[in-house]
Structures are given as C-alpha cells and as structure tokens.
Amino acid sequence: MELLGNLELGFSVALLPLNIAFCLLGALLGTMIGVLPGIGPLATISMLLPLTFGLPPVTALIMLSGIYYGAQYGGSTTAILVNLPGEASSTVTMIDGYQMALRGRAGPALAAAAIGSFVAGTVATLCVAVVATPFTALTLSFGATEYCALMIIGLVSSIALASGSIIKAIGMICAGLLLGLTGTDIYTNQPRFTFGVVDLLDGIDFVALAVGVFGIGEILRNLESGETRRAIVGKVANLWPSRSDLKRMTGPILRGTAMGSLLGVLPGGGALLSSFVSYNLEKKISPNRAEFGHGAIEGVTAPEAANNAAAQTSFIPMLSLGLPATPVMALMIGAMTIQGITPGPNVISDKPDLFWGLIASMWIGNAMLIVLNLPLIGIWVSLLRVPYNWLFPAIVTFCCIGVYSVSSSAFSVYLIVLAGLVGYGLQKFDCEWAPFFLGFVIGPMFEHQLRRAMLISGGDPLVFLTRPISATLLAIAVVVLIIIAMPAIAQTRKQVFVDDEA
Amino acid sequence: MIVNQKDLGAGLSFLGMAIVYGRVALRELPFGSALAMGPGYFPIVLCMLLGVIGSFLTIRALCAAQRISLSSRFSWRPVTAICLAVIIFGTFIRELGLFLSVFGTAFICSLASRQFAWKSGVYLAVVLAILCTGIFAYGVRLPLPVIGTWFTG
C-alpha cells in the first residue's frame, strides 16, 4: 500500500536522533507555554523562529509543530488547576475541569484531558496522513476562482471563532485585509500604504505584528490589574481515572475527536470552536447531563480531544494547499519560506521526506506529550508557581530578540510596540485578533487570485457561480455564515463565553 | 446621552482607518476596472466596507439602550515601562550588544510591575542576560553581537 510506504519513509525521517531531539524540545516548549497563561503558541513560535534558521527544514517544522500541539496539552493543566485558560482553546475545559479539581478530583481530570488529547492527536494525525494525498490531487485542479472561494470560506469561518460581536469580527477581517496589502503591488510595482516608510515596502512584518499583539498586548492587559498571584487548587493525587471514569470518557473522546478533526480543516481555525461545539454536544446527549458545570468528566475529555484533533488537522490546508488555516499556520508557512520551500500542493510530491516526516513526528510528539503530561505533571504544576513578575520581563526580552533576529531591523522592533499598544487598545473595545490575522495573511493572496480570476473571466464576476467547485465552496461559505448568524447558535456562543468569564 | 463605549471605540477606530486608508487609496492608487483591477480596486472596496461597519457601530453605540463603559482601569506604569524597554532594545542593540541590551530591557520591563523591587529586578536582568547570551549568541549562533560597537571601538 502506498500509504504504508509513505509512512515508512516518514518514520525513517522522524526517527533520526536530531529530529527526535527537536520533537521533544518542541513538545517541552509547547507544554510549557501551554501551562503558562499569557503566552500562546503564536507568540512563542514567532519568538523562536530564529532558532530554526540553522536547522534542516524538516527538523524546523517538526519542532514548531510540536510547540503548537504541545500547547493544547499544557493548556488543560492550567485550566483545571487554576481556572485560567493556559491556552485559548482550553477555555471550555475550565468549566468542568476546575469543578472537578475543587471536588478533589484534579488527578482524574488531568488524566482525562491528557488521554483525550492523546487519542485525538493520534487519530487526527492518521486523518491527515490519509486525507492529504487525495486532497492535494483535488486541489491541483483549482484555479484562481476556486482559491478565492476557498479563502472566503476561511474568512467567514474565522468569524465563528470570534467570541464577541459578528460585526466587529468582520471589521477586524477588513482591517487585516487592508493592512496585509501594505507594500509593493506585485502587478504595478506601486508602493501602497507605506506612508513613505522604506521598511514597509516589503509589507508589514507579520512576526513583529503577532509578537506585538499576542505577546506585548497580552502582558499589558495582565499587568493592568496589578494582581499577579495565582491560587492552585488541591494536590494532584491518584492520577488514574477509575474504571467508571474510563467508561464515561470513551464516547466523548471519540465524538470530540471526530468533531475536532472535521472543524480543524476549516480555514479559520477550529481549535477553540471545536472545543465548545463538542462540549455543547456532550452536554446535550450525555446521560450525566445534570453533572455538567459541576465537574463532569465528559466535559473535560470531549473539548480537550476536540481541540487537539483540530490542532492536528489544521495542518491539512497548510500542507496540501499552502493556505494557512490559522495565524499559527501562517507562521509555519513563513518558516517554510525562510527555508526556501514554497508551500503548496507541490510539497507532497517534491519533498515527500518533509511531508511524511512531519506527519510521522506528530505521532512521536503525541506519545512524548502524554508522558510529559501525566507522570511528569508535578514539574508543570511547579511552573505555575513562578511569579508573573519574573515571567513577563523574560517574555518581552525573548520577543525583542526573536523579532530583531528575523528581520535585523530596528523598525520591526518599533512595530512590536505599536502593535502591542493597538492590540491592547482594541481589546478593550471587545475587538478580537484572530479574524484580523487571518485577513492579514490572506489579504495579498486573495487580491492576487481575485485579479487573476477577473482577468481570466474577462471581468465577469459571475464566474464564481458558474464554475461548479467555486459555486459549491461559496455555498458552503453562505451556509456557515447563516449558521453563525442563527439566533440559536448565537445564543449558544454567547452562553459558552459567558460561562467562561464566570 | 447613553453611550456604549466599547462599540463607540471600535466603530471610531474602524471609521478612522477607513478614512485614512481610503484617502490614500483614492489619491495615489488607480482604481482600474473589474477586468483589470488597479492597485486601488481592492483597497477601496475594503475601505468602503470598513467605513460602513464603522459607521454602523458608531451609530449603534450612540443609540445604545444602556450605558456600557470600558471595563478596566488604565495604568501608565506598565505601558510606559514595557514600550520603553522594547524601543531601547531596538535602538541600541547594535551599540550595546546582546548582553547589555537584554540586561537593560529586562530591568526596565520589571519596573512595569507595582511590586517592583531593586534587588530582584537586577537579579532577574542578570540571569536573563546570561541565559539569552548563552542560548542565542553561543547556542544557536544568531548573528547578534554580544558586545556592542560602543565597546569594541
């Protein structure tokens, strides 16, 4: 079978000592930043991008991916023990996880989260392996029109990801698209929106922007309250879930995995979305419905399984299309470009060792993570005792070094400050950044494909509806938009996010 | 007047951006046609959309049924300290070198916290400077000077 041969190739790459070492490093770093609230995979990967310059491309990607899915594991620890989202996608886990901890069941809650993540990660990686090849084949027939339609789905579904007002999310997308256009227009060589600044001719530095908004902006927000203490609940004793716990976990894990795998592929990034969709699903169908909100183990496993599955499958559009489903994937693309690889449908045929090596490393990484997160949980708990006053100067410093070494320009460092301030300000107005970044990354690609599509069709916008694939994709986008705007769903979204704040 | 400050802030920000970018685009960038889109086509469409969203939010904010204020207080101390720290890093990294830049940035950063103490601030900055120099300059060999041009002559 072809798949087996490919996987064999993959494992032969992923099992090289160098790659194992960097996979472990990625998993360690990922868990660490997942556990620490206030720093996410996006800022971390941007900061650590320079670390990968000297590495072979596969190794670099293996490490960066490890950080990303490792963060999904670590986030649950903080959610359960401190009632803070260590990672955005673990907000839902807080609801029942923290309740379990309050009832002295922190151990089983942590185990449930880790086991759920592990099963989901393993299964979802298999999905990536199986789906990637046919998906790539399908997309080879895509023209400019189809790419445009695909990106519209991405932008629309990123609205679902935002917890607040839909209109503000659309506004942030537009702002992102506009800022993404900064730089030299590739068709006419005319500089756009550079305001006479030479450093902007190549566009706005994505890494600096991401570090500013997610690194500095977050720190400013955390510091304004002045409170830096954290209360850790309970001791983590008897980690292993009982037989009845295990029985109750099985269904939610499987459903969470399915949900996460499916939603993760959607551009717009499904980790957060899938975790709350699967939480609500369990809440509806579980026989222990009454326990939800009071420490139901299903309410911990299902969202954790879902967010980890989504983290894995969000690699599918990136690897097979070169389209970033999330801002983190945009950074991965950036990392590939730095290494001289053009992301897109050709990667799988031109660089099979990179493609399959990365996939194989995900299994290895997930296996490492379950060891890191269960037997070694004590280490991460003690990490939570590190005072924030030590943490944030370190984060700021790493941010500066990271951005400076990627761009070697003082301007990019100043950009961090600007982005941090704007990020901090707009957050006060309940504007969210995930849709913005998707727009920012997609902006230039979208305009490019739109212009091509219009040139080819002779300026006829109906081409989007007459070509079957693009019409289907646009129909999906409309359905997604309707679903988001539906009062029932809007209510659920609101409710979930209100629960989080409680 | 009853005002939803959050919507107002967001609305005015979007509106402001739409106006600034729209002006630049209209003045400098040719619009082109649907067939051959000029560099101004897509930006102008976006600005119009952003302008509509911004106006809608602003109007909705002014007619809000209940007053919604910005949630938390603002304090100058963290904002000033952190911005200053980053700007100093960017400006003087070549001149100061990695070791001293990290020391300075980390120390100024720690001033951001209200629980700042001299001893722990200096201690933290030294530890970070040693760590960062070790990891980034000697470990992964980033092309960053450990000692800056001010000291090497």
Image: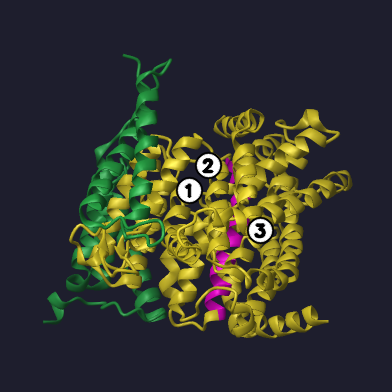
Label 1 sits on residue:
A435
Q: Percent position (x, y) of residue A6?
A: 73, 82
Query: Which residues fall within the magenta stretch?
Result: A58-82
Label 2 sits on residue:
A162
Estimate how packed mark 2 is, as few (under 14), some (14 to 19) or many (20 or more) residues with alpha carbons within 10 Å: many
From the viewer's side, name the closer residue of A325 and A102. Answer: A325
Q: Amino acid at mark 3?
A: Pro
* Chain of the residue where label 1 is placed in the rendered structure: A
Q: Quadrant of residue B60?
A: top left
* Chain ID for yellow: A
* Chain ID for green: B
Can residue A421 be seen? yes
Q: Amino acid at mark 1?
A: Pro
Q: Percent position (x, y) of residue A390?
A: 39, 53
Label 3 sits on residue:
A468
In the displayed structure, A402 sits above or below B33; it is below
